[in-house]
Image (cartoon, coloured by chain):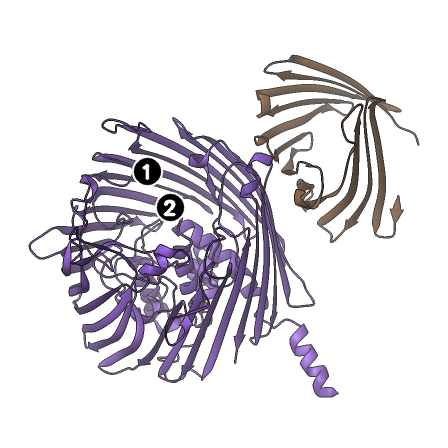
Chain colours: A purple, B brown
Amino acid sequence: MKKLKLIIVFILFPSGSFSQEENVSEIIASIAEELADDETNPEAAGIFAEKLYDLIEKPVRVNSAEESELSRLFFLTDFQIKALADYIHSSGRIYSIYEVASIPGFNTDLARMISPFLSLGPETGSGSDSTPPGSVLLSSFSLRSPASDTSAPGPPWKLLTRYKFTAGRFSGGFTAEKDAGELLFTGKPPLPDFFSASLTWTGKGIIRKVIAGDFGARFGMGTSINTGLMTGLSLTQSGYLSGGDEIRSYTSTDENIFFRGVAIQLKSGRSGFTVFSSINRIDATTDTTDNGKEIFIDTFQRTGLHNTKTSVAGKDALTEYCYGINATSDFKYFRLGVLWTGSRFSLPVRKNDPVPEDIYDFTGTVNTTATAYYKAIFGRILFYGEISSNPGQRIASIQGLSFRPSDRLSMNVLYRDYNPGFKSFHGRGLFSSSAGDNIRGVFANFTYEAARHMFLSAGCDLRINPWLKYRCSAPSLAVKRELRLKYLPSDKVTLEAVYNSGKSALNRQETIGIRKQETINSKSIKCVFKYFPADNLSITTRIDYKSVQPAGGRGMLLLQDISYRFAKIPVSVWFRYSIFTTDSWDSRLYVYENDLLNSFSIPALSGEGSRSYIMIAWKAKKLINLRIKYGITEMARESESEKNTKELKMQVKMWF
Amino acid sequence: MPAGNAGLGVVYSHFGYKDLMRHSAGLACGLKLSEKISAGIQTDFFAEKTAGEYDERRSLTFEAGILITPSEKINVGIHLFNPVPNSLRKNYLPSSLRAGAGIWLSSSLFACAEAEMSTGRNIDLKAGFEYEPSETIKIRGGFSSENTSFSFGIGYLMKFAQLDLGFVTHEMLGVTSSASIIFRLR
């Protein structure tokens, strides 16, 4: 009986770390929204969230002052990492988060934001040996009604399961996913539609890491290899992630960008060396030549969805052989890196009837890329750059500069030129286009602490598309600007206003003759008020206004969030109610939603209606975490009732 | 009506005549949740009757609000009307959301701002002030983004009553004026 009582107490009552973790979702949402402001792809925010949750699971041991450990805080700039390390070297151990706020390059807002990801305990050396054995299982189920495609071969729900284990120097796990409309098991032997697994060994000697199975990688600025989040998304981000070479086990659900094989990372003194090899089957649409004798690849399928006849036929249609060799060397003030990587396909890539837009598209079976990159810090100036080339063909180049004239002011300037025809199948470079090529531009921004607790930042990006692109049948020019003002009068109140404006060219709607272009102007204002009346209660009010000319009209939204954590039981509740009205799809509004762990929801709201959700989380110590979310989008007009949707999501996370 | 820590309220309204009649009734409960936070909820019943072939429309819903007083000089309020999905009822009923804050800038000057939005309508941003040049006189002014409307008012406080006069501009309708007397019974 006594044992039973203990178990009940253990399950029903919150642990000491509960309140901190409850706030983490809010912080993640805030960071993700800031970084991914331009990104409407939920997968990108999901990757970002996953990296942050990894940090929560294994916080950064700040007081170790090792660059490799501190750089796990991937959202910090090189300046901030260096300032943090210098501070610990000169002043000794950091004892409180308020101390972090006083370090040059940091402020109260940033310190508060990163606090869940830091461990301020004494230095204990490398953690790989001391990591206790443990496993984490996360399983999510989601169902949307009505289903987007009723003719799909599989059931309309989505299922995702992730398992990770750690045992000393070894770690590993698997990811299994079935999207809505896909069959649960396919192929021989029957496996979930997407299944990924890996085993990692981490060492401290010359061999630092060995991964067998599925893995992701990132080298330099990512023009050649970057299977993770594309950085440089927000115009007013205070710095850009200019380094961070890594290989890591693959746990995301992008089904076509990762590597499947072996990767080895070596390090000796100031030099690093990484080599990898991969054979992976990816999705593609095949076609045949006019005489029917040759099969070739017409387009690559990137969505990972296999819920239509065409997409099922294209699943794993192509085998990609990949390899890469990367070497880096650190000198006193700079780092130099070179990378050679290649891809070979089992079928040639070409188009039967290319249109002018396709002239620079990749053709053939082999693509190799040579890359060189550097990073140099001189006092308060950071230079970084990268050049990649498909040998004898087109190049992609980046040259950036970060400058901190004072602790309250930081500035960034970046030039990039991704030639039309430059191709990298696993690259996501800084400020590249979604296709990775056909863009040339200059970007600049600054962040200034204008007064105590008041931050002003602004950014501008000018981009030129020297060749045709999707929905624009002529070379074009685009401009984006952002102005952001953030004021934190106290720990409990945050006020933020963001103004965006942009200009781009798109084809007019004429259906005959040569397509002409028109300039689309868009402007938006977002005002956010966050208030924490009590430790367990937070309230957020947000107003959005958007205007798109000439045809798009206006969009408006008023949103109210309330989140509450019960004091006596380990249960938290998130509630949102928002009302929106937009004149057209062009003036649609994107609003990030708190969602299940390791994921995000970013619904596109258009028309006239309301969007609301309630989410309940229950956590019993570090044993089990349950989340349930129910969301409704309801249109005000009966003529738009086909847009009405309901979603149910459930998740369980277990530690054992 | 006081009921322990809570306060209860009843509201009934009637409008119209035999051929077009609207009734609304509500039962409300307010509660002080903590020193700084109060909340209230009200169940609402609406009935609308139109002569002829039109159906009688009846709707049941609720509304809720929360009032926070971070300090003696600041109030923050949120009000949500009809969060119930329309798919659960036969007749469509719009929803609305209001969020606002007020601050005493000095002992005689109060300023406030509010954002309101209803389904199918544009957002309405409002701001206003009330100034007390003396203990018996109040001067009020305001702006609403809907119809670009400005308002002005004056109040006079007597021992047994309060007299108010108001004027509101409208893009199409011009100026609308109003007057009211509130009697105090003690």
Name the mark on residue A6: none
Residue at image x 47%, y 63%?
Answer: A598
Q: On the image, which quarter does residue A128 sit in?
A: bottom left
Side of A249 where A29 appears, left or right: right
Q: Residue furthest left?
A: A392
Does residue A452 show up? no
Which quarter of the figure has residue A60? Answer: bottom left
Amino acid type at mark 2? Asp
Q: Which residue is farthest top?
A: B174
Q: Furthest residue to the right?
A: B186
Quarter of the figure that contains the N terminus of chain A: bottom right
Instruction: Give the amino acid type for the residue marked by disc 1 in the picture.
Output: Lys
Q: Which chain carries label 1?
A: A
Q: Which of A192 and B110 is in front in this view?
A: A192
Residue under label 1: A480
Mark 1–mark 2 contact, CB under 8 Å?
yes
Q: Is residue A300 above or below residue B182?
A: below
Disc 1 element:
strand
Q: Is residue A433 visible?
A: yes
Residue A630 screen position, x and y as percent: 60, 55
Return the x and y of residue A298 as percentages of the image width and height: 23, 53
Q: What residue sits right under mark 2 in the picture?
A: A38
Give whichever of A337, A262 is nearer the camera: A262
Q: How crowded is mark 2: few (under 14 residues within 10 Å), some or many (20 or more)?
A: few
Taking A252 as reference, is A538 above or below it?
Answer: above
Q: Is mark 2 on a helix, strand or loop?
A: loop
- Residue A604 vertical placement versus A44 (above, below): above
**Residue ranking furthest to the front:** A291
